[in-house]
Amino acid sequence: MKTRMFFAALAAAVALVACGGSDGGAGFVTLPPPDQNAPPPPPPPPPQQTNAKVSGRVTNALDGQGVAQVTVAAAGVSAVTGDDGSYSLAEIPPNASVLLSFSKAGMVPQSRATAALSGSGASTVVNVPMLPVAVTETFDGQSAHDVVVPGSTAMVRVSANSLRRPDGSAPGGLVTARVTPIAPASDVNVMPGNYLAATDGGSAPMESFGALDASFTDADGTPLNLAAGTSATVRIAPSSRAGTLPPSVPLFFYNTATGLWVQEGSATLQGTAPNQYYEGTVTHFTTWNADQIYNTVRINGCVQDATGARVAGALVASEGKSYTGQATALTNANGEFSVAVKRTSSAFVVATTASEISNAPTVNVADEDVPLGSCLELTRSALSIKLTWGERPRDLDSHTLGANADEHVYYSDKGSLAAAPFIALDVDDVDSFGPEVTTFAKLAKNRTYRFYIRNFSGTFDPGQTGSPARVEVSNRGAQTVFSPPAGESNSTDYWHVFDVRTDEACNASIVPVQQFLADPPVSLDTSGNAQYCN
């Protein structure tokens, strides 16, 4: 009964609304019919996106000095490096990744793909070393000519009348050749690109055994390349962290449009050590690399900050110790990563953000994926030191003097990141090239730390200067690179590279020292109980 009364009342109310009521006394208003010609309401505005930013510093790979007036270009925007080599590209549309190019007359062109920049306002830091051109010489292009790099087995041999301008015409006047060997075993970052080779399925990581950049211009500065149907011979000086060199390897050239290496031809190992070289035939000039794609396994792990919170979007890099190569991955929303390494090898992994850096543990892998024992931890100090060198001297050692007089971190006492001195030698190396990596977890207030290198081998043919040794310091995202100064002799085993000075807030300043010494430097801090910043 109550149900019938409810629906009857509802029907009466609907009828009253439909009729519009009488003279308004019932409180209802008659609505006009909708205007069929009225434009639809505008859509809501899209969420505002902020462009991505890429910044960094360009350094001379030989002496670590900043390189000014380098043109840096990516995604249709460009900038020029300042006096200290720094640059910033702030108008990059958010994207999965962008390919950066670095160019300057007299320097070997560089290129690097960034990590993902898909988020609004994303930013990343890309520091790159550039090599000065090793040999520049002029010759008559109508004659055959060998461009030989002094002090190296690297060479380019061109046949008579084999060079042409882009329109196919012969070069005007004399030809200028620019040839530079690239030695990635001493510094993996000198290689253009990201150690990725083009494959049918996309890309695959590769290891290098040395590379060579070659370019030619005529008297007008017009680029030249090999005429159709002709070829040239290249010799690539070997550079590898592997124990043995393969007798033959594929040749790859760098595609500047894709950022990938493309296989074309092969090279065979010739000569007698230490004067060996990979020789092959090429049909065009660019950067050529003696490489091979390797079978991979993966290191799986996580990244956290100093409080233990997981960090998304951190860049994790693996770098070979027993091979010359590198791979990268980004952490997911849970701070987890999976990064490729060469199967049956030794490598180290490190995580970075725009202003922080983690510890760098060494991982030995076999034929299966390896879980990292604990999360990589981004340090509060964000200070890290990386030492690399050449094949000789066989063993260089990193030494760090801590905040207290009795704190000495080196191969015999590798320190600790969890307790004082809050410094650890994460990666040690005893058989050429390096790297050795020293990480600081915390810094003490108003203290002076010291970093120096010992030539443990005691050999000077060459010494640290001729090797050459290279020290790369990362201090809250800012990079400083050191190369050996003048003054090395057979009695100077020690290279005092720099000091680190801290203030009351534990902000660190890198203070160059750059001295060769017969005896190791001593600590400046003789009192105990250093006060560390949390």
Image: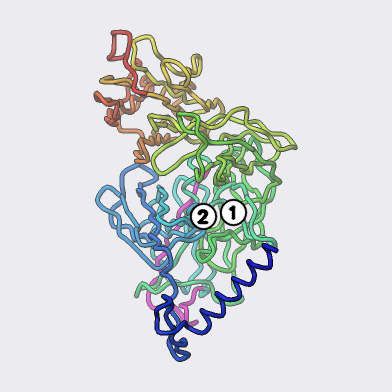
Which mark identifies residue 193?
2
- Point out residue 290 in the picture as x, y percentages from the top left corner: 60, 52
The C terminus, quarter of image: top left
Find disc 1 in the rendering and name its residue. 196
Q: How is the image coloured?
A: rainbow
Q: What span is in magenta?
A: 163-184
Q: Which mark is residue 245?
A: none
467 up-or-down from 41: above or below: above
Give the distance between the C-alpha atoms of the residues marked 2 and 1, in whole angstroms: 7 Å
The answer to whether residue 81 is seen in the rendering is yes
Q: Residue at x 29, y 9 (%)?
A: 526
Total numbered badges shown on the rendered structure: 2
Q: Is 164 colored magenta in this rendering?
A: yes
Residue toward you, 97 or 321: 97
Q: Residue shown at 53%/60% (left/top)?
A: 259
| Near-viewer residue (389 or 117) | 117
Tag 2 and tag 1, C-beta contact below 8 Å: yes
Name the kind of residue labelled 1 in the image: Leu
Other-residue count near label 2 (Cα within 10 Å), few / some / many at <14 / 14–19 / ≥20: many
